[in-house]
Amino acid sequence: MTDSKYFTTTKKGEIFELKAELNSDKKEKKKEAVKKVIASMTVGKDVSALFPDVVNCMQTDNLELKKLVYLYLMNYAKSQPDMAIMAVNTFVKDCEDPNPLIRALAVRTMGCIRVDKITEYLCEPLRKCLKDEDPYVRKTAAVCVAKLHDINAQLVEDQGFLDTLKDLISDSNPMVVANAVAALSEIAESHPSSNLLDLNPQSINKLLTALNECTEWGQIFILDCLANYTPKDDREAQSICERVTPRLSHANSAVVLSAVKVLMKFMEMLSKDLDYYGTLLKKLAPPLVTLLSAEPELQYVALRNINLIVQKRPEILKHEMKVFFVKYNDPIYVKLEKLDIMIRLASQANIAQVLAELKEYATEVDVDFVRKAVRAIGRCAIKVEQSAERCVSTLLDLIQTKVNYVVQEAIVVIKDIFRKYPNKYESVIATLCENLDSLDEPEARAAMIWIVGEYAERIDNADELLESFLEGFHDESTQVQLQLLTAIVKLFLKKPTETQELVQQVLSLATQDSDNPDLRDRGYIYWRLLSTDPVAAKEVVLAEKPLISEETDLIEPTLLDELICYIGTLASVYHKPPSAFVEGGRGVVHKSLPPRTASSESAESPETAPTGAPPGEQPDVIPAQGDLLGDLLNLDLGPPVSGPPLATSSVQMGAVDLLGGGLDSLIGGTNFVAPPTAAVPANLGAPIGSGLSDLFDLTSGVGTLSGSYVAPKAVWLPAMKAKGLEISGTFTRQVGSISMDLQLTNKALQVMTDFAIQFNRNSFGLAPAAPLQVHAPLSPNQTVEISLPLSTVGSVMKMEPLNNLQVAVKNNIDVFYFSTLYPLHILFVEDGKMDRQMFLATWKDIPNENEAQFQIRDCPLNAGEDSEPPTPAPRLYPGPCTDWGLPRPCDPTEAASSKLQSSNIFTVAKRNVEGQDMLYQSLKLTNGIWVLAELRIQPGNPSCTLSLKCRAPEVSQHVYQAYETILKN
Amino acid sequence: MIGGLFIYNHKGEVLISRVYRDDIGRNAVDAFRVNVIHARQQVRSPVTNIARTSFFHVKRSNIWLAAVTKQNVNAAMVFEFLYKMCDVMAAYFGKISEENIKSNFVLIYELLDEILDFGYPQNSETGALKTFITQQGIKSQHQTKEEQSQITSQVTGQIGWRREGIKYRRNELFLDVLESVNLLMSPQGQVLSAHVSGRVVMKSYLSGMPECKFGMNDKIVIEKQGKGTADETSKSGKQSIAIDDCTFHQCVRLSKFDSERSISFIPPDGEFELMRYRTTKDIILPFRVIPLVREVGRTKLEVKVVIKSNFKPSLLAQKIEVRIPTPLNTSGVQVICMKGKAKYKASENAIVWKIKRMAGMKESQISAEIELLPTNDKKKWARPPISMNFEVPFAPSGLKVRYLKVFEPKLNYSDHDVIKWVRYIGRSGIYETRC
């Protein structure tokens, strides 16, 4: 009980004295001195000058002293790397000590010394310790690998420590297993692509066995690791869940939450009809409620997680409302979280109780809490329609208390209630107006002004009220100024005679005296509207407002799914993905819930590959014949193009042809009973090789227009990148006009409006010929299809690649940017046919170095005029289909020619040279560039050769691509 | 994982600072002090993010313990670890106070080195730790090889909480069923929420490696057994209780509980918490509080509170305390009570009424006149609920211990030789009635 004296030495010359003491002969004095050093170190004094003296004390058989010296070393070795080398010998020697505690201590400490030279010496002792006979040493060595990896990842790989660590997962001692799992999980996080942990049913089984035996902390490591695994089907998911559920009764809340994470994640894979699914749901509620009797800090973590769980699966806790009632002495952070969950669980069944509670809370002392309670009452009104009336009267009661912040908060929520239930509660406006003077917060003032403006016709003295706000216009916040401007314009439109002066005044205040651009712009817009067309102004300003949506404050579904994978961790506490608060690459691997696959479902289509497999495993299912597969998918999913010369059936035939010929090797040429499409959808979600990504992006085949070939719509802007707006689209050319067919999907929770589009300058001057017309606001989960006509008269700038188009789309939320590549054939004009003489002359005229030659492989030209039934019905092909490669009775050249012509590539002449068909073709781009082509087709050979000549040779590559696309479709 | 661990006194001075990860610098120590301990506003969350560094803190009396990290760690684990660390420190040197921490800082560093490696929590069972981390620096050669390997196998072993070779002349065990009953009642006497959170604490002084089996009147077990003999179901079925949820000490075999609902374990030596449970159905509420508050004009309040005890008349409740909140502008209070002593405590803004003992099925009353200073504060008095404290010698949940069987196959003592003691204590948790 005397150690505290070390904290009190503050006199000068201390270091000098300590030095003397450290070098003393007396052991006790030495130890005392080291203690003083550590105490100084703790309070932040620099005692690095004593380094050699302290290290000298290292050679001791006193374990306590040794530990103190080690502690000092860990702190200062980095600043004195050369001196630290002095310690290496002792470490190496200690690693051989007969006492396992000392061996472990040495290897543990050595790993904490971040000096390159020491690290080198660490390798050999570490290797031995990883195979030590004593489990205590092994479990310490396992963690040491993670330490070493943090210092020098390459070294760890080179020395083969990762393999040794993997072996430790099968160790007989549960704690060694747990530490190995923890170390591997952390190392794997910094190498997201590596398959370090290599989770498979066997290793999972080992982990589940160790789970029953190891310490509480070990259980957490193992459960967190299990959560990263994706079971192959619902049966495996269920069996893992069954073995994890007993953990829900563990006294350690972290074990419980990690178990909940595994269950919540694997539940995604279970069919809802399963009995087990229901059982599991029931089992989840009690442990979650129990977490609320833990210490307040843990309650807070639990509540933040419950908030996510309630949003993901509201059914789990729907009957447990009462446990979230706030207790008088809960810490404020617990109170606020409970309140949030109460509102989420509010329903018609329990609303009376909830309201009674909320009213109670609104009289408490903590201002934040009271505000939130008042707001909650408003949210209840919006969420549960039947309760709206009671909520409004409760709010009115609260307004009567005249407590300033309560009144303000109430007014803000009442505004929302008006929006949700128009023409129902306006009778309370009079009461609200009485409190006008007490409002001093911008949000409340803005809300009140909105109410006055919106209901100006019912408020006799609306003009006076608004005028009173106008006096201090420039002192108001922007929010209030904007609202006031709008409200007065509304008032003017409703009562034009008396308020002309007022509106003049506000318009001039907004436009002339303000330096806020938003305010000024809005002012000008109103001014011009009013002065040019008051009727239009009325339509614009007094337009009917869309109803506000029911639930507010919900987390975006994509983010929610990600956060569910992070239950128990900081991410779930912050409600933010780790990338938002973790630096560097560590731990920011994007996680997502496994897709639902049930073996019962796959029974319907036996060819469906398990979609639950991680992307990396996909190639096992489909041999890595990238090109072939790409073509196959392209054909199969391609829209039935119904250009006149190209029958729908031809496309299907093309697919079949390829399946028969190309896939022969895959399916062994035996009876192949499946619709050709069956194997394909399963792979859609999983990217197979980067080269194919373009083709995989095709989602639906909507391309029924006649005209040149239309590629299926591809996702251009994923919802993740655009706050919930997903854009997919394609380009079409139809009778001389180009258009961009867009499909906008709202995957966010709020309504989207005010769409607009703009292109960056591009190589061919593509520009929207009309504004983007989205007629109605896009509500959540709604999709709208728009065809945007394009012109080619925009400004020109050469892009790289040539057909790159950069697009900006704006909506009420933000502006989003994406770029896409357009196929060149949309630029082939209808009058692109050159006459023969001209062609010949031009061909000669263009220098030879401008000629480019390309091979178009595997193009299904032979399928031109086949008339198979158009539906991809299951068909039976008897035996190996050897005859698929033979020429078809029709003329392939003719087919190609007509196919190309529909995309404005015109055949000028045709010749037959040595059994090969030569097509001479011409095409013209919108900017007047002519391209001449020679296409050589060999009957029976699926490839053909294309030679292109053009004065602007850079387009050749893209023309070739256009050829390929057209011919293959 | 945890990057560092700091302990501060109430002034924000560092007492202990141990950094485990390279990404945590010395400035983190100051960041926490400035942004949390010295923050102007009261901290509103136990997790704080300062410049992409996350701080977890708990407070024990006026000592701050903070864990710091830059990664996406398991937050629940960090808090569990901080509590565990408090337990370990308390087991070594008693109360966590500035003085004790300063006096034991070497020991604390030694513990921190052992129970947290590179930020990963390791075995933190005090039983195991005490075998090799002692306050008198042990010298390695004093231990025999067997002793050493025994220590390491215990620290890493499956039964990390108990060492082999424990011997007692008298095999004895104590079971305490400790319950805290929580209530929130409306002024009209409607139960808004009520639950019991209970703990079964066991003190075992048993030789060898005893295999124990614990049984209680759990409804699910009773009903399962009752299937064979319908007779017993009707008899004991009434007395069985529905347990909403329970959690167990890590010595309990959870998979066995999950499949058979039997509680079997090898206990640590000495005192430990065997289980925690929660019930919400059929709770015996030991006391009922009936408040009556009347405002007489603007300067006077009349308060009358009746408490009724609701249990067997033969039992005695103890340490009864009723706390009646008074408004902030109270100028004077006159109290009259039939039983016990009542006092107005101005510093706590409450009338505190204490009764030493009270038998079951009795009733007692207090009435008070509160005089108020006139204020122009518009805000109404919030009327905090009336809270109550008490202790009763039974379990309000109705839980009964049916048996605790001990088997030690290797040593020659049987279940009958073990002396067993069972005790029930029901305490008030948050026991509030709104007025």
Image (spheres, rainbow, N blue to C red):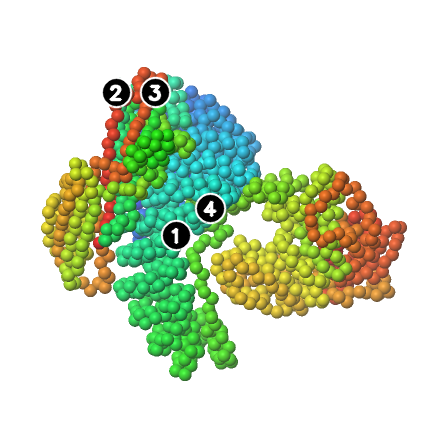
| Secondary structure found at label 4 | helix
Discs 2 and 1 carry the same chain letter: no
The residues bearing labels 3 and 4 have C-alpha atoms spaced at a distance of 45 Å
Is A38 in front, or is A945? A945
Discs 3 and 4 carry the same chain letter: no
Mark 3, mark 2: which one is toward the viewer?
3
The residues bearing labels 2 and 4 have C-alpha atoms spaced at a distance of 52 Å
Mark 3, mark 4: which one is toward the viewer?
3
User: Which residue is disc 3 drawn over?
Assistant: B408
> Where residue A220 appears, x then y in whole percent?
43, 36
The subunit carrying tag 4 is: A
Asked if the residues shown at circle 1 and circle 3 are in contact, with their CB atoms under 8 angstroms apart, the answer is no
Task: Tell whether A101 sits left or right of B14.
Answer: right
Label 2 neighbourhood size at 10 Å, few (<14), some (14-19), many (20+)? Answer: few
Residue furthest to the right: A914
Badge 2 amino acid: Arg
User: Which residue is disc 1 drawn over?
Assistant: A345
> Where residue A599 appears, x then y in whole percent?
57, 40
Label 1 neighbourhood size at 10 Å, few (<14), some (14-19), many (20+)? Answer: many
| Secondary structure found at label 3 | loop
